[in-house]
Image (spheres, rainbow, N blue to C red):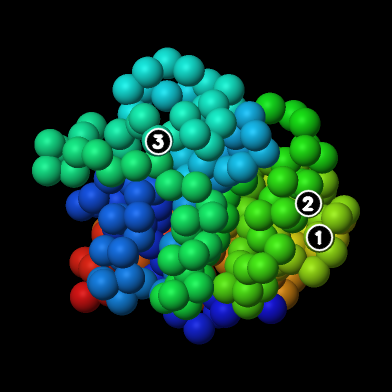
Amino acid sequence: MPRFDDHFIEAHRGASGSFPENTMLAFAEAAKAGARSIETDLSLLADDNFAIFHDATLGRTVSGDAEIGSLDTAALAGLDAGIWRDAAFARQPVPTIDEALAWQAQTGIGFNWEMKCHHDDYPRHARALKAALRRADPRNTLVSSFDAECLAAIRAIMPDIALALIAETLPGDWREQAARLSLDGVHLDHSTMTAADARAVKSAGLALRCYTVNDAADIERIKALGVDMAMTDWPDRVAA
């Protein structure tokens, strides 16, 4: 069981409200703010390494228009993931999972790895993830995805890893999915989650975590519903 049940605030893509998302700078600032775990995104590269990167293509947080999956690890060195936020953040690189894991080993910060399965070669994603996490502390490791079939491929070769299904609204077949995938929890959009959803998930013995919660009133609402964790862009403000 991962150490994700002893704290309420998780930093969404690091301290992404103030710093460029999914960069080591954003992770370090989240840790400074007191976050004990970080939600971040894994995108598979051409050489079966993972970039800490959200989108299927470049263009939003780095310049260019290539598919992230067409690049290899060496190609990441030429990308600037910070300047889109501000010139003060120029030359922030796109990290790899290895860099994040090395930092985790030093800090003890947990990672909620959101798998971005930009193509449907799910076994390849699963094999690459198993290789990448071979030395990671399972207690500080949670894997989540919107893609249930990607999670199924991971479960098939990683029987003990903690998995969570992400959804904008609670799927009608969530109980069947939870049993099939041996889920640790469900991650829901706080703005569409109902009190009935929260009761159902919690009564099933699953962890209930919500994204992306940035308003104090929303924090209080989901706390009252028994939500286990709030993922936020502003870990410093929400913790305060």
Which quadrant of the view contains residue 185?
Answer: bottom right
Q: Which label is found at residue 154?
A: 2
Q: Secondary structure at mark 1?
A: loop
Q: Is residue 231 left or right of residue 136?
A: left
Q: Nearer the viewer, residue 52 or 237?
A: 52
Marks 3 and 2, Cα distance to the nearest angstrom? 28 Å
Q: Is residue 178 left or right of residue 82?
A: right
Marks 2 and 1, Cα distance to the nearest angstrom? 6 Å
Q: Position of residue 80 (x, y in %)?
A: 30, 34
Q: In the displayed structure, would residue 58 be above or below residue 223?
A: above
Q: Which residue is mark 3?
A: 77
- The amino acid sitting under disc 3 is Ala
Q: Which residue is mark 1?
A: 158
Q: In the displayed structure, would residue 102 be above or below residue 16?
A: below
Label 2 Cα neighbours within 10 Å, binned few <14 / some 14-19 / many ≥20: many
- The amino acid sitting under disc 2 is Ile
Instruction: Examine the rendering and report whether any part of residue 16 can be seen.
Output: yes
- The amino acid sitting under disc 1 is Met
